[in-house]
Image: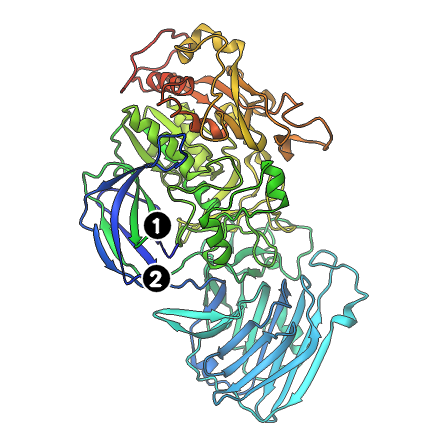
Amino acid sequence: MAINGYTNKLRVEPGQKIKFMINCETHEKYQAEIVQLIHGDVNPEGPGLKIKTIETNINKEYAGRRQNIYSGSYIHVPDDGLFRNIQSFTLQAMIWPTTPDKGVQGLLTKWNDSTKAGYGLFIDESGCLALWIGDGSGKVEKITTEKKLVERCWFLVGASFDASTGTVTVFQKPIVETFNGRFSLRYSLENMTAHATAVIKLKPKADNDAPFIMAGFFHGKDSNRNIVKGIYNGKIDRPRVADRPLKQEEMEQCVNTPFDDLVAAWDFAANIGRTGIAEPSKIIDQSENKLHGTAVNLPARAMTGYNWTGDEHHFVHAPEQYGAIHFHDDDLTDAQWEVDFEFDIPDHFKSGVYAAHVKAGEEEDYVTFFVRPKKGTATAKIALLIPTASYLAYANTKFHDGPLTQLMTARAPIIEEHDLYLMEHQEFGHSTYETHSDGSGTCYSSPLRPILNMRPKVKINLSPSLWQFNADLHLVDWLTEKGYDFDVITDHDLHEEGVDLLKPYNVLLTGSHPEYYSKDMLDGIEEYQHLGGRFVYLGGNGFYWIIQYNPENPEIIEVRKKHAVNTWKAEAGELHLSFSGEYGGIWRHRGRAPQKLTGVGFVAQGFDVSSYYRRNPDSFDPRVSWIFEGIGTDELIGNFGLVGGGAAGLELDAYDLSLGTPAETLLLASSEGHTVTYNPVTEELFSPGPGLSGAENPKVRADITYFPTPNGGAVFSTGSIAFLGSLSHNKYDNNVSQILGNVLNKFMLDEPLSWETVGSHQAVGS
């Protein structure tokens, strides 16, 4: 894993340029070549790795170099004479620390750590509030309250320095209300309050080549990047700077009524609009000096502030109560590496799944990207919708070995090389399935970093085989082997272009797990169905979580989790998406259950072995007999496969009229024989109890369904993540492959599908 990289964007079209950023740690040179990815599963029971080299002008040797990642979010305010020329000063803020004992953390700092020059308000190595003053000669005064801050409690913290007398004052005052923090009782306020005064001779050297940093402190430069250390974990609200020493009473007044003569009075709620935060990285100074800042690595916005009352849970309706930003020492939205090479996509380049294969000695990486047709064009009747939003949600997932993993899989998980590497290198950032180092959930994910599980050959230890990207290559391989022409498009394209992206295609195929969806994406597919498009849903747990794309950089997604199957839960009052103001969580809870779109929706999951389907009476309806041409009456469907040994497994979707499955839907087949590790998902339960597992509960199943849509369209769904893993069995000659071929051949036809149509059609391809 000593060589890795990423691109400046996930998708590109002919005529556009894509940039590659490569980290090569142990070799002076490396080779790069563009390859087409067809099959990435190295399971010896399958067809094996299929990667095709594409001749391009970037296929050559490059100089290797180490490129570092500096994770952690903070606010950068450019250096200014008002900070440099300051003599006396006051620093203050409302803070909600989450890891006060982790070591030194910067709060509000004009500090150069390499020269020990400047001034700043810190949490020190003992977890206490402290003011640091350094003269640049190596001498530093650190004045502390000597009372530890308490995690997840709001404090007004402040420090002042009077240059004329050398007097320093540092204080912390807990702000405890019923809703705003860890406690609601006020009996312990005295134990959390502190006030310290000292007289020092040292004067700060503020002209120190350091910017003003909130939630960290400046350490130095790496090329054109700032190195910020001491990243703070927790929330900050209403930070202020004055060029005179304020009394505590004045600081308290400044929280909500800033004095006109303040150097800076930042308001993190100032750019909250009716549809969320249009510029999440913009930090507004409301003082006359307009010392605006930039949020780096996207700390969490739309967070409850010190004054949240619990009465309003939507930040756009009470922005004054959402003036906090939550910083994390492991946030990462842009590694900011330098570009190593660029690739201009030729006009004739075929749409598909590609990568830059970079290799140094025995070390290698595949830096994946997707090529779509030029905007407004299509080169095939079939479109494969690559679930890039879901890939981001799972980017660099760390499913570690442990009791929970073993219970979920009913086996001792195998730790892969990329698992070990990510355990050792937390700086590569999290998926939306991890919590940050302070226990809060990861709500943003970006492709502007190496994503080590969006590569061929990668398996995950939570499932019997593959998940997401490599599982979807099973379909790419099948389409290629069967001779179907198809275009690759992505979630990002669908979000931006909607139904216009889909209109040219007769058929739209999903991958195995299209789980994360924005409203615009759902609208696009629904409109496509109404226009007569044919939609084939080939996965499980699809169309589930509500997401939004960053309005400043649409490569980045946001999700907020709470009332569903998840690995973290949003804090009270923080379920709405900062990017758009939408209610977060799952679509089912916003009245848009996936059954309405596909006929089936998420009902159960299990991660030991997969099962098979058995035909239902509806499968013998003459109107859909063509789907089962070549399939025996009592033939078990998919009792084989590369993902758990069957076509029905991992996460299962079922027919449910009460949740919106169209009345015309035919229930063609259902899975059976699932194990005790398969259980209903939380939104299916009113109360837990015995007898709910797959071994006992007939509702734990995957359903294959079909229903017609207006203007000669139709929807076919398989309801299982494992389904695609069965396509290549017996050299692609099997009943799962046969059924999908029957559906695809019918759906490709140019004439409208008739609900009464009966008959066969000649297969396409080999």
Q: Quadrant of residue 474?
A: top left
Residue at coordinates 44% horizontally, 83% vertically from top-left?
Answer: 208
User: Which residue bears the numbered disc 2?
Assistant: 26
Tell me if mark 1 has few (under 14), some (14-19) or many (20+) residues whose alpha carbon lies within 10 angstroms of its own. many
Q: What residue lies at 55% left-to-right and 50% top-to-bottom?
A: 434
Point out residue 89 in the picture as x, y percentages from the top left corner: 56, 83
For the N terminus, the image quarter is bottom left
Q: Is residue 194 above or below residue 298?
A: below
Classify 10 Å Cα crowding around label 2: few (below 14), some (14-19), many (20 and above).
some
**Could you tell me which residue is drawn at 48 percent across and 25 percent down?**
647
User: Toward which corner of the image does residue 4 lie, by quadrant?
Assistant: bottom left
Q: Which residue is mark 1?
A: 365
Q: Nearer the viewer, mark 2 or mark 1?
A: 2
Q: Indicate the amino acid at tag 2.
A: Thr
Residue 766 vertical position relative to residue 365 in the rendered view, above or below: above
Three-letter code for the amino acid on which mark 1 is drawn: Asp
Scheme of colours in the image: rainbow
Residue 444 placement (x, y as % from top left):
49, 51
Q: Nearer the viewer, residue 456 or 730?
A: 730
Q: Position of residue 27 (x, y in %)?
A: 31, 61
- Horizontal side of residue 438 vs 623, given as left or right: right
Quadrant in the picture for the C terminus: top left
Q: Secondary structure at mark 2?
A: loop
Q: Are marks 2 and 1 in contact (CB under 8 Å)?
A: no
Which of the two residues, 208 or 4, is positioned nearer the viewer here?
A: 4
- Per the image, label 1 sits on a secondary structure element best described as strand
Residue 503 can be seen in this image: no
Give the mark, 2 or 1, whose residue is nearer the N terminus.
2
Whether residue 72 sits left or right of residue 486 in the image: it is: right
